[in-house]
Structures are given as C-alpha cells and as structure tokens.
Image (tube, grey):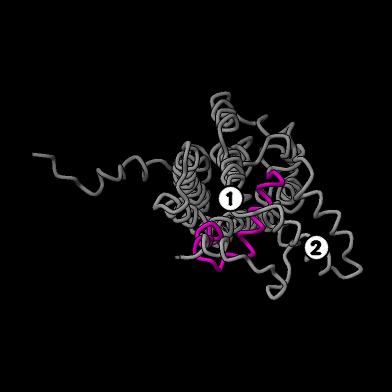
Amino acid sequence: MDKAVYYADYLQLDKITGAQEPESFKEGREPAHDEMLFIIIHQAYELWFKQVLFEVNSVIAIMNKPVVNDNSPEMQTVVHRLKRVVTILKVLVQQVDIIETMTPMDFLDFRDMLRPASGFQSYQFKVLEAKLGLKFEHRHGQHYYTSQLKEKDIAIIKDAESGKSVIELINAWLERMPFITEAFWNNYRQVYVNSLAEAEKINATAFEHVFDHAADAERNFSPKACRSALFIMMYHGYPMLELPFQLLDTLLEIDNQLGAWRYRHINMVQRMIGSRIGTGGSTGAGYLKAAMDKHYIFKELAQLNSFLVDRKKLPVLDKGGAGKLGYF
C-alpha cells in the first residue's frame, strides 16, 4: 500500500518556510523588520519564474515536433499554457503592490547588507527571456549581462540561448501556412497602398521591407512569416484562424505584461532609491528603463498592426480559400 501523503510533507514546507535567513537578523545586528517581506517577495517571484519556464518549455517541446497539427488538441494546449503564463505575469505585476508597502527608510535599514546581491542576478528571468526569443545581441548592457553571475548560472543561460526559442518556432510555424497565394498578396498590397493618406506614404516603403525583402539580422520574423501573421490578424473571424489568432495575441500579451512588470519595477526602484546605484552595481532605474525600451520580444508582431486596412476594404477570399478556413 502506498504511503499516505501528508500536506506539509508533499509541499516540503519545512524547506520553504525555513528558507528565510535575513542578514539583519544575524547575531550582532539590529533586525530590520521589512527584510523578511523583501526575501519572501523575491522567493515568490523565483517560484513563479520556475512555473513560467515549466510552461514555456512544454510549449517549445510541442512546437519543436517535426509536424504540428494546427487542427489538434496540441495547438489548444499551446495557447492554453501561454495564456497561463500571461495570468502568472499579471500576478508578478500585482506583487509589486505588496513590496511597495515598504518605505524607502524601511529598505535602508538593511539595503547595504545585501551588496553585491541584486535582482539582476536572477538567472531564471534571463533564461525565460532567452527561451521566449530575446537574443544576446539585442540585449541592453551586454557587457553587464552576465558579469554578476556565478559560472554555473551563466552556463544555464548559455544553454538556453543555444536552444530553440518560442519566437523561432513561431516563425517556422507561420512560414508553412498555405493559404496565401501571390495573386492575393499582390491584391492586398495595392489595397493597402491605396488606403494610405498622403502623410502615411512612407509606410509603403516599410511594407516592402517587412513583407518582401530578405530577412535581416535585426529581424526575428521572415517576410513569409510576417505575411502569414498579418493574414491571421485580418481574417481571424474564420474558424480555422481563430486559434492561430489567439496564439499571436497571447504572445503580444506576454510582451505587454513583461513590459508592465518592468515599468512597475522601475517606478518602485525610483521610489526606493531615487538615482542611487543598484546594489549589484548597475545604474539602477536608468538601466531598467533602457532595458524595458529594448527588450520587447514580439515587437515585430505588434508592428504588423501598421499594415492593417479597414475591414470593409479587405479583399474577399475566393470560395476555395474561404472554404478551407471554414467548417465546411
């Protein structure tokens, strides 16, 4: 007979609740009450990062199969798990409310005891960014990126960077979408150009760069993948494209929530330490702001909204194309 499972043992609560050792509580120091909150908040963040990575790794495993059936439970699973990631990220943003119950003076009671530890040393967050698709060459502050980490953590990050990312797998998935013919695309190009106001004519050149020129090192999505993504955005009312649209929309929401978390983090840092240098040696809020501006992972998908036209002007799909996208 299997041994009965006990709540505290199953959750290993002794390890979890015994994992808080505030520096200020050590012998000979004056205990800083809010250091306990500081530790627990950051431990909670790391646990959520672990769960997000668990979900993202499962999505990568599904999307990395030789064949992915779009009309199967697997794609529903991908969307479901990425939506769970979005929900978790929303919780991460909300947790800032808790840490902001700590005043700047409360933080100063123990801040100097933390040096040179810093949230920048969270290797799990760097792994998450890499798994989603943030490339090293696109990072802000590359010289500082791993300088504060232990070798074992750097190795974990480098391993993540060498593997397939979500953005690479989404690009490959979009590239094989079969619905767009050259005739349709030429028609849409003309419809789009005709829709532009005089002041927007520069967008016609941008259109050619995104959808017709060879992909360059600065872009993650190929022209073919961009065409497919735009098609999904335009015609997502068709049943066959409903799930693909949810997938793209969820990726954009992941970026949105990561941006919201970074924004709240910047405001919190400015409130707590003003313009002071971070405990890990970074420029504090200044570094965080520059990283926020540069680290949007799926920004190329968001930029495709620039190339949409009024629904009433969309080219009407022929019966063959419409039939493939419907139930019959």
At 61% from the left edge and 65% from the top edge, which residue is drawn? 318
Residue 79 on image: x %, y %:
48, 55
- Residue 221's quadrant in the figure? top right
Q: Is residue 239 magenta?
A: yes
Depth check, front residue: 64 or 162? 64
**Label 2 to label 1, Cα distance in Å?**
21 Å
User: What secondary structure is the magenta-colored segment mainly?
Assistant: helix
- In the picture, measured across the screen, residue 228 lies left or right of residue 283, that is left
What residue occupies the far top of the structure in this picture? 151
At 44% from the left edge and 54% from the top edge, which residue is drawn? 71
What residue occupies the far left of the structure in this picture? 1
Depth check, front residue: 225 or 44? 225
- Residue 147's quadrant in the figure? top right
- In the picture, measured across the screen, residue 22 lies left or right of residue 196, that is left
Q: Amino acid at mark 1?
A: Pro
Q: Which residues are magenta?
A: 221-246
**Residue that mark 1 sits on:** 178
Q: Secondary structure at mark 1?
A: loop
At 56% from the left edge and 31% from the top edge, which residue is drawn? 163
Residue 62 on image: x %, y %:
45, 42
**Residue that mark 2 sits on:** 190
Residue 81 vertical position relative to residue 62 in the rendered view, above or below: below
Residue 261 on image: x %, y %:
61, 56
- The answer to whether one can see residue 295 in this image is yes
